[in-house]
Image: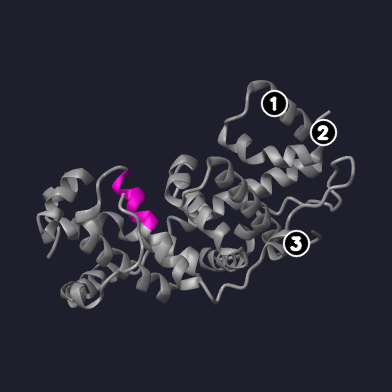
Amino acid sequence: MVASPGQAGFRDTELLEQLKAGDEKAFAAIIDRYSAQTYRIARTITGNPQDAEDVVQDVFLTIFRKIGSFEGRSAFSTWLYRITVNAAMMKVRGREVRTEEDLERWLPVFDAEGRQLQPVEDWSSNPEKVLLQQEKREIIRQALATLPAEYRVVVALRDLQGLSGEEVAEILGLSLAAVKSRLHRGRLALRGRLAATFGGTE
Amino acid sequence: MISCKEITDLLADYLEGSLDQQTVQALEAHFSGCRTCDNFLETYRTTTNFLRELGEEEVPAELKERIIRFFREHRGRQEEEPGGEETGSG
């Protein structure tokens, strides 16, 4: 079951019609097209590669089994990512211990006039000087793991995956304002965490 | 005069380019006079760049093969696992 080169040119809607008709090559083409993104989203939400792979396997099996009920009211990718997020959140449910307080301790603090209370150093070029790419990624992953899951999911879809705010809102069933707020707070907390690692004085 | 806190609240919209010209000018005037916010902007931007890089990371080479193997082992078991997770119907 290998996707033929011709299938790379098919649009999602054509592949889905073939998949509904039971064409395994169409299924292989869907895996070819979406497995990497699905894996990265699952990895960011669950925080580890093995859980991510379990999630991805479940997701594609679910896609195959439920394709008949996909009505195309939203884009296929929206449906796929929604299934991925649900499956990944199931994995972390119960073991997730991160709270809003965990996030808030990394946010900037201001005085009554709206001035930053702590000095802010520009550490943005420090990681490149002292770390290998792999080490840097590991530090970012560790920082991500300290965010509550509902923030990780927004960061995964918006910043790692590069989806628009509107797409993320549709996938998660949230308002655009809620997506923007979670993304910004999540980024602020990550910035604060990374400052503690990469900066000297913050 | 726009405060550091207000600047911070607008960073995501500023980087996305979704602010009106007048607000952009007010932000940039603040950045040029406030080292703290300028540093904060650079490190906020760097944080988003790191996240984007993480989104380009290689995935395991055998991932697709393993998905297909898992699929072949489990595809026939649909009737044995009634219900399944709630996933929405598109």
Dominant secondary structure of the residues highlighted in magenta in the image: helix
- Distance from Cα at disc 2 to Cα at disc 3: 27 Å
Labelled disc at residue A105: 3
Query: Which of the two discs, 2 and 1, sits closer to the camera?
Result: 1
Q: CB of mark 2 within 8 Å of CB of mark 1?
A: no
Crowding near pointer 1: few (<14 within 10 Å), some, many (20+)?
some
Where's residue A47, x and y in %?
A: 50, 70
Q: Residue B70 vs residue A171: left or right?
A: left
Residue B61 seen: no
Q: Secondary structure under badge 1?
A: helix
Secondary structure beneath dot 3 equals loop
| Amino acid type, residue under disc 1 in the picture | Thr
Question: For this view, does B76 lie left or right of residue A106?
Answer: left
| Range drawn in magenta | A74-82
> Upstream in the sequence, badge 2 or badge 1?
1
Residue A48 versus residue A98: which sits nearer the camera?
A: A98
- Location of mark 1 (residue): B23
The amino acid beneath tag 2 is Gly
Residue A161: percent from the left, percent from the top?
44, 51
Q: Nearer the viewer, residue A115 or B57?
A: A115
Disc 3 crowd, CA 10 A, few/some/many (<14, 14-19, 20+): few
Q: Are marks 2 and 1 on the same chain?
A: yes
Instruction: Tell whether A107 sits left or right of A91.
Output: right
Chain letter of disc 3? A
Point out which mark residue B33 bears. 2
- Residue at the top extreme of this rendering: B22
Identify the residue shown where x is 51% and y is 72%.
A93
